[in-house]
Structures are given as C-alpha cells and as structure tokens.
Amino acid sequence: MPLLTTTETGALIPGPTATLMYDDWYPALRTSTLRPGKMAKAMLLDIPLVLGRMANGHVFAMRDSCPHRGIPLSVGWFDGHHVTCKYHGWEFEPCGGQCKVIPSLSSHDKLDPTRIYATAFACEERDGHAWVYIPGPGSGRKSESGERRPVPELAKFDERYRTAFLTADLPCNVDHGIVGLMDPAHGPFVHQAWWWRSRGSIREKTKRFEPIPEGFRMSAHAPSGNSAPYKLLGVYGEPVETTIDFVLPNRRTEVIRCGPKWFSSLTTVTPVTASTCRIDVVAAWNIFYNVPFVPAVAKFFGRKFVRQDQVTMIEQAEGLRHNPSLMLIDDADKPAKWYFALKQARLEAAADAASRHPLNGPVELHWRS
Ligand code: FES
Ligand SMILES: [Fe+2]
C-alpha cells in the first residue's frame, strides 16, 4: 500500500512504510563535517553514500559501494582528487564516478577502465547542506543538470545575517515526519512553555491558504499573538508579517518580515530509510543583529523546540509499531491531506499533476491552537 488513504469517516489505513519520492534534492550532511582528504558517510532514501570535498572545493557524493565487489568506498582513500578502493585499488574520479585506473591490468588486458563507472550523484552545497540529487531507481548514470529541479536554498534579504542549524533523527517514516511538521494543533500541547504558548492560550484561528506549484502557502499574515518570540518583534514598531510555504517533496519555508528586519527558515524532513527520517532546520536572520547572545539564545530555544517534536515522535513510533489505523480530520489536518494528494499526483507523475492540485484557489481553514 503506497500511501495512507482516507475513507469517508476520515479514518486512515496506514501503509507499512512511506513511498519515497525520487528525482529531487535531499540534504545529506553538513558540509562543515567534510575534512580535507577525508570521506564522510550518509544515508538517503536507503542509499548508502560517501561524500567528500575535492581539492578545488566542490563537494561530491557517490554510492558507498565499489562497482567491482561492493566494498564501501568510504573504507578506502581519498586524496582530494580520486577515491581509491581499499580492496583492489581501483581509482575513481568522484564527481562523475569514472574509473581511471585498475592496477591489476597487464599489457595483455584489453579492458578500458574508463568505461567503468561507480555511481555518482549530483551534489551541491547551499546553506551548509550537501544537497544530493537522488534519481529514480534505474534512471542510469548521473543525469544532465538541465533535467534537474533547482537546488533548494534559504531565502535571504540582506548581505549581513546570522545563521543557525538544528537537526534531529526521527524514528518514523517520512510521511509521519512531514505531517508532524505541518500540524498546527500540537503546538499548545507539545510545545508548552512560557516562552512559546500554553494550553490556556489556545484560541480560534483562521488562516488563509493558497495553491503554489507542488505545494501550498499559508498566505502572509500577522503571526500568532500568543507566542512570546513574535511579541518581541513588536519592539521594532513595524507590522510583522509571516508567510509559510510547503513544497514537495519535504520542504517548509517560513519568512517573517518586520520592515527591513527579517527571519527566514527552511525545514526539511528527509527520508533516511523507508521507515526513518531526519528533520533539519537552517535559519538566517538580521533581527536583533547587533544584540549580543541572540544567536546563542535562539539556538538554545530552537533546540528545545525541535527536541520536543523529536521526543513526541519517538513516543508516537512506539504506538505505530502495532500498525493502528489513524485519522486525518478537518480543518487542522487539511494541510496533511493536501500533502498526501500532492505526493500522489507526483508519484503518478503525471503530465496532469498540475491540474490535480488539491487546492483550486485560496481557502480559509479554522482551528483552535
Ligand atoms: S572491490 Fe573495489 S577494487 Fe575490487
Ligand atoms: Fe512541532
């Protein structure tokens, strides 16, 4: 069963694992972890990867498996130019995967090593992430860049800004991770804290959504008055406006603007395996740029916030082990339903995917949170 499906009553029949979406960019690891002449391992969509940084600064990603006998390339050597397999010493150019040298070949051999390729993936560095393009199974060697979607990037509105990064492993499949990401109703329960909000602060909300390509936007609005971080922005005396987008396969962007001041974040929920995922948050801002300790304080609260989601999802995974049937209700779970519909349209790949957008136009949703 590929996806959760809704029934008339809103009940859901859970599939064992999420269907994975290929042909897109996923963050594999932080490029700050790449050391000169060293390789690092990562896992995306059940594919073991080895990554590194070339002497010229470019990052690369290969399947962590030698095409000769399958030993991980990560146990071999990397000199900034070539990856050498530990077993029989075949040498590969890591960005394209081409084999350059097979040391065992003699003058009697006709084999041309350069006709052999290890699997290399397109890999680009943005916002400190090594983004790797994962083509669909069986789509052959690294495809030409013209066919790929653009590399995701955090929106920035100024030259000078501060940044932060947070990550957490989630023991659930990517669909549960994403549904958790766009779920407005868990806030007052999971994220209870004096600085965010409490159960007592629950109030009725109306939010306007509009369709965007392969996603939806919570239209620009003044953020919830019931959370302290947004109240702080009041010191600038300018109207505060926030826009939140979700776009397939896994990206939520939030932009808060307050006159010339801004905060921007990109949150991704990335399938590591078919049944586990990882949440990554990169953020940039020029709000309180010159106020000391703000980055440290922001990271402290950000970590706490992500940790609350992580703990909840660890508990949820315990319940999901027994394959319960689940529900998506109106309106608080409507964005989750849109996500499943958008995903289904993409998976069916459909030339008519655009016309199958679950939103025909702007809509208002109502919930209490
Ligand atoms: S297994 Fe890699 S060179 Fe033989
Ligand atoms: Fe949350």
Image (spheres, rainbow, N blue to C red):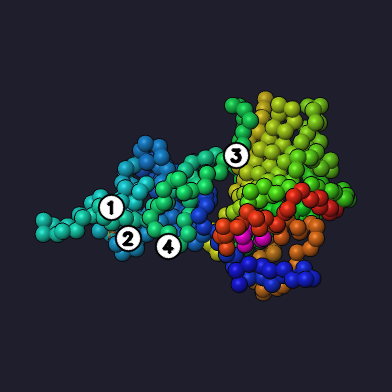
Residue type beneath disc 3: Leu
Residue type beneath disc 4: Gly
Q: Is ligand 2 closer than 8 angstroms to the Cβ of mark 3?
A: no
Q: Earlier in the sequence, mark 4 or mark 2?
A: 2
Q: Secondary structure at mark 1?
A: strand
Q: Residues within 10 Å of mark 1 (few under 14, many from 20)?
A: many
| Closer to the eye: label 1 or 4 | 4
- Magenta segment range? 340-346
Q: Residue at x 37, y 36 (%)?
A: 56
Horizontal side, residue 116 vs residue 201: left or right? left
Q: Is ligand 1 closer than 8 angstroms to the Cβ of mark 2?
A: yes
Q: Earlier in the sequence, mark 3 or mark 1?
A: 1
The quarter of the picture where residue 112 lies is: bottom left
Labels 1 and 4 touching (C-beta < 8 A): no
What secondary structure characterizes most of the magenta part?
A: helix
The residue beneath circle 4 is 138
The residue beneath circle 1 is 99
The residue beneath circle 2 is 67
Labels 2 and 1 touching (C-beta < 8 A): yes
The quarter of the picture where residue 5 lies is: bottom right
The image's mark for residue 154 is 3
Residue reaching furthest to the left: 108
On the image, the x and y values in percent for residue 77 come to 32, 50
Q: Residue at x 48, y 48 (%)?
A: 148
Q: Earlier in the sequence, mark 3 or mark 2?
A: 2
Labels 4 and 2 touching (C-beta < 8 A): no
Residue type beneath disc 2: Pro
Q: Earlier in the sequence, mark 1 or mark 4?
A: 1
